[in-house]
Image: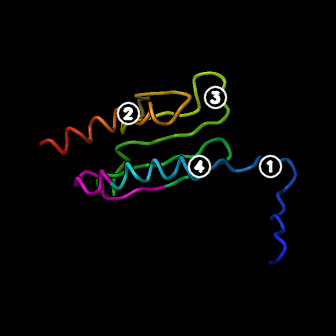
Amino acid sequence: MGTVTPFPLPLGRAVQVGFERLELNRILDLYGRMVSAGHWRDYAIELGRDAAVFAAFRRAAERPEYRIEKHPALRHRQGMWALVNEAGVVLKRGHELAPVLAPLERRLMKLVDQ
């Protein structure tokens, strides 16, 4: 195999925040179930210096219905995970991803029952 050479970062720049594989698998699993229920149609991922954001859309040309945000700087305070609605209100915040996604899981159960 070859040698992996890291891409050089400019001095003074922070490393980009991203989702780990298990986190992204859990989020995409929820997204797939919401798509199959007919509720969501599109998503976007934003990876920045301060946060990583997964946004879920009902339609492609509007504001995201929900945003799942990861802010590692808040990991020792309020928790690095946040669920934000379309109006920008934080619905749930926590240290673990599963409890933050719980309101969406409950909503998915209601969608399937209807």
Task: Name which of mark 4 and mark 3 comes first in the sequence.
Answer: 4
Task: Name which of mark 3 and mark 1 comes first in the sequence.
Answer: 1
**Image x and y of residue 29, in percent:** 40, 52
Q: Look at mark 3 in the image and give the residue it sits on.
A: 74
Task: Identify the element where label 4 is drawn.
Answer: loop
Nearest to the eye among marks 2 and 3: give it.
2
Nearest to the eye among marks 4 and 3: give it.
4
Q: CA distance from mark 1 to mark 2?
A: 35 Å
Q: Look at mark 4 in the image and give the residue it sits on.
A: 19
**Drawn side of residue 48 relative to residue 110, left or right:** right
Quarter of the image for the N terminus: give it.
Answer: bottom right
Q: Residue at x 45, y 48 (%)?
A: 27
Q: Residue at x 23, y 39 (%)?
A: 109
**Image x and y of residue 25, in percent:** 49, 52
Q: Which residues are magenta?
A: 33-44
Task: Identify the element where label 2 is drawn.
Answer: helix
Task: Name which of mark 2 and mark 3 comes first in the sequence.
Answer: 3
Marks 3 and 4: in contact by CB < 8 Å? no
Q: Look at mark 1 in the image and give the residue it sits on.
A: 13
Q: CA distance from mark 4 to mark 1?
A: 19 Å
Nearest to the eye among marks 1 and 2: give it.
2
The residue nearer to you, when weighing 77 against 84, is 77
Tag 3: residue type?
A: Leu
Q: Look at mark 2 in the image and give the residue it sits on.
A: 102
Nearest to the eye among marks 4 and 1: give it.
4
**Image x and y of residue 71, in percent:** 61, 36
Quarter of the rendering containing residue 107: top left
Marks 2 and 1: in contact by CB < 8 Å? no
Which residue lies most toward the bottom here? Answer: 1
Q: CA distance from mark 4 to mark 2?
A: 19 Å
